Structures are given as structure tokens and as C-alpha cells.
């Protein structure tokens, strides 16, 4: 995988460098390429046009501004922030502005390698190459997106969309990635699904460096398969919570079998109804009403 901003589809190329309003204001080739990288990054995240993308900017006085754009317009909106300071984009879309997330479409890790003495002052591409080597040795696929933020790295794995009920598995996978890449300053706090990442082509005010897109391979992994590769196979003896494992299923089947046998006895002896004065066979535990008030009185 080349450690450079990758090529884009021909339709996105036109959108990124020529057709969107405001892009023509970027006079220099360098500025146009920065707008192109911003569009590539956002298109990979929100190109399916589902829901709303969240964008966040921080003013020079530290005031934070949030706003949302339809996912289909997010790439265009992102280009207008190129050259500005401290601009961010949400990794997962929302159902509506300020509403709940529309699902899970990414896993991510934030590497603050500037905090690690070994990597302080290192070229982001060297750090990225070492991080990819660590992932490869663990059998984990490479991220589809990587951004040099000015003093760190942002890694993003694109996944097939899944519902929010898969959030525990997604967080567990990101925690595993954070532990694996701990030697590169992986931030353990960045495992939430509402995370925003720095937008390529914008300025990091802490270092004066422009964020750059280093990897653009927008292939979406199957969510369950990727989590399995990250977390490993389920350990022996693992039991699902809330009685939903194989053992609980077998117990329920046995209870229903016993109840069916009792019903056959009643049907054969008394035509399906226990006569007056004959004790009714007790039902197995877990079958039928358990509260005394709900039982039928006889005799």
C-alpha cells in the first residue's frame, strides 16, 4: 500500500478541484490539492449519502462551532474549510442534526506519537510504516484512511454499515487496537462512535502544520469479519449472557418435551381434561403461569 494520497474516481476528481463553488478561490496548485484531499477523505466516510455529517470548527479564541450537512453535500462543505485552522469531521453520520447516530460505518484509532519519546519529532510516514507493520504482524487489515494531523496520526477502518446495537463490539475492537498500538501513543479515550477527526487540508494551530491525507483506500470491510480479526476467536468456555447460550436453549427444549409428554398422558387417560377430584399433574418449572392467582382452582 503506497503511503501517499491515492487516486480518486473520475467523478470525484471533477468535484474536488473544479466544479464546487468556492474551490476556484484556491489559486495555488497546493491549495487545490489540499481541497482534493479533504474531498477524498469526506467522500470515503460519507459518500453513501446516508444521514447528516457533523462538522466542527474552533475559532482563534477557542470557541467551538458545530453544524451538520446532508451526507451527500459533506465533501463540498469540507472543501470550504481548507486552509482554515482546527476543523474536524464526524466519522459516523447522524439520522438528523443533533439526533442519534445513523449506525456504525467506521472503526478508528488516534495515535499521539508526539507523546512517545521514541517517536518525538519523527516523520509521520515513518511512524505510519511502523504502525502498519505492527498491524500486519497481528493479522489485522490496514486502515483505509490515514491522516497526518501535524503531530499525530488518525487511522480509520471503513466497515459495512451496521446498527448501533453493535456498539459494544465496535468499542471492544477499538480498545483492542488501542492496546496493540499503545507504543505509538494510541489515545485510549478515542473509542467513542461520535468521534470527530481533523480534516485534511486544514491547519493544526498547535504546530502550524497542515493535515495531510497519507492513505486513501476506501474499501469497506465486513464489520463482523474485521472485529473477529481484531479481537480473535471467542475463547473456549465463553457463555453468552442472559441465558442465550446453547445450554439454555437445550434446557428449554427439554422442558417443552416434558410438557408435551404430560399433555399426551392427560389426552390418553381422560380425553384432554382432568376429572374432578384427580390431582392435576404439576407443570415443569418455566412452563405456563407461575403466579398462584393465575392457576385454575379445582375440587
Image: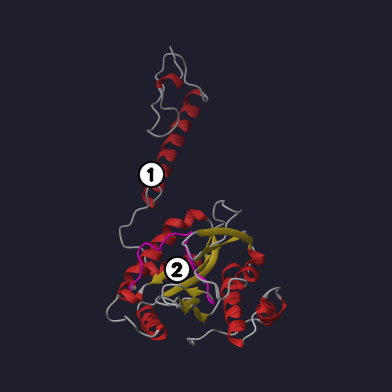
State the image quarter where residue 101 is shown. bottom right
The answer to whether residue 232 is seen in the rendering is: no
Q: Decide: few, some or many residues near mark 2? Use Cα within 10 Å; few <14, some 14-19, many ≥20.
A: many
Q: Work out whether 227 lies above or below 124.
A: above
Q: Name the image quarter holding residue 168.
A: bottom left
Residue occupying the far left of the picture: 117
Residue lying at 57% horizontally and 79% vertically, measured from the top left:
37
Q: Is residue 197 magenta?
A: yes
As for residue 93 lying within the magenta part, the answer is no
Q: Quadrant of residue 20?
A: bottom right
- Per the image, the residue denoted by label 1 is 251
Q: Is residue 143 visible?
A: yes
Vertical arrangement, residue 172 with respect to residue 245, above or below: below
Where is residue 27 drawn, in percent x and y? Answer: 65, 84
Figure quadrant of the C terminus: top left
Q: Write down the region rendered in magenta.
A: 185-201
**What SS does tag 2 mark?**
strand
First reached walking from the N terminus: tag 1 or tag 2: 2
Residue 283 image position (x, y, % from top left): 40, 29
Nearest the eye: 48 or 190: 190
The residue singled out by tag 2 in the image is: 108
Magenta stretch, main secondary structure class: loop
Residue at point 39% right, 81% down?
136
Which one is in front, 284 or 73?
A: 73
Please, what secondary structure does the residue beneath circle 1 have? helix
Dot 1 surroundings within 10 Å: few (below 14), some, or many (20 or more)?
A: few
Amino acid at each position: 500500500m503506497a503511503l501517499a494520497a491515492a487516486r480518486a474516481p473520475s467523478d470525484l476528481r471533477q468535484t474536488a478541484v473544479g466544479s464546487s463553488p468556492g474551490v476556484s478561490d484556491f489559486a495555488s496548485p497546493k491549495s487545490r490539492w489540499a481541497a482534493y484531499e479533504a474531498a477524498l477523505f469526506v467522500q470515503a466516510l460519507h459518500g453513501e449519502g446516508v444521514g447528516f455529517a457533523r462538522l466542527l470548527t474552533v475559532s482563534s479564541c477557542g470557541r467551538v462551532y458545530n453544524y451538520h450537512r446532508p451526507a451527500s453535500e459533506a465533501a463540498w462543505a469540507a472543501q470550504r474549510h481548507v486552509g482554515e485552522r482546527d476543523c474536524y469531521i464526524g466519522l459516523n453520520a447522524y439520522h438528523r442534526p443533533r439526533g442519534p447516530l445513523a449506525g456504525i460505518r467506521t472503526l478508528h484509532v488516534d495515535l499521539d506519537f508526539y507523546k512517545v519519546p521514541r517517536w518525538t519529532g519523527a516523520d509521520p510516514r515513518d511512524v505510519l510504516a511502523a504502525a502498519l507493520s505492527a498491524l500486519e504482524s497481528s493479522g489485522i487489515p490496514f486502515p483505509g484512511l490515514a491522516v497526518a494531523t501535524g503531530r499525530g496520526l488518525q487511522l480509520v477502518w471503513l466497515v459495512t454499515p451496521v446498527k448501533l446495537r453493535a456498539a459494544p463490539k465496535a468499542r471492544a475492537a477499538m480498545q483492542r487496537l488501542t492496546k496493540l498500538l499503545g507504543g505509538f501513543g494510541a489515545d485510549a479515550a478515542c473509542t467513542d462512535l461520535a468521534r470527530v477527526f481533523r480534516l485534511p487540508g486544514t491547519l493544526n494551530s498547535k504546530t502550524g502544520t497542515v493535515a495531510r491525507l497519507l492513505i486513501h483506500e476506501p474499501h469497506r470491510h465486513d464489520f463482523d469479519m474485521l472485529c473477529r480479526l481484531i479481537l480473535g476467536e471467542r475463547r473456549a468456555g465463553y457463555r453468552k449472557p442472559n441465558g442465550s447460550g446453547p445450554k439454555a436453549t437445550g434446557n428449554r427444549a427439554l422442558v417443552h418435551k416434558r410438557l408435551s409428554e404430560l399433555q399426551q398422558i392427560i389426552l390418553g387417560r381422560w380425553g384432554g381434561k382432568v376429572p374432578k377430584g384427580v390431582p392435576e399433574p404439576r407443570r415443569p418449572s418455566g412452563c405456563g403461569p407461575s403466579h398462584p392467582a393465575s392457576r385454575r382452582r379445582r375440587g
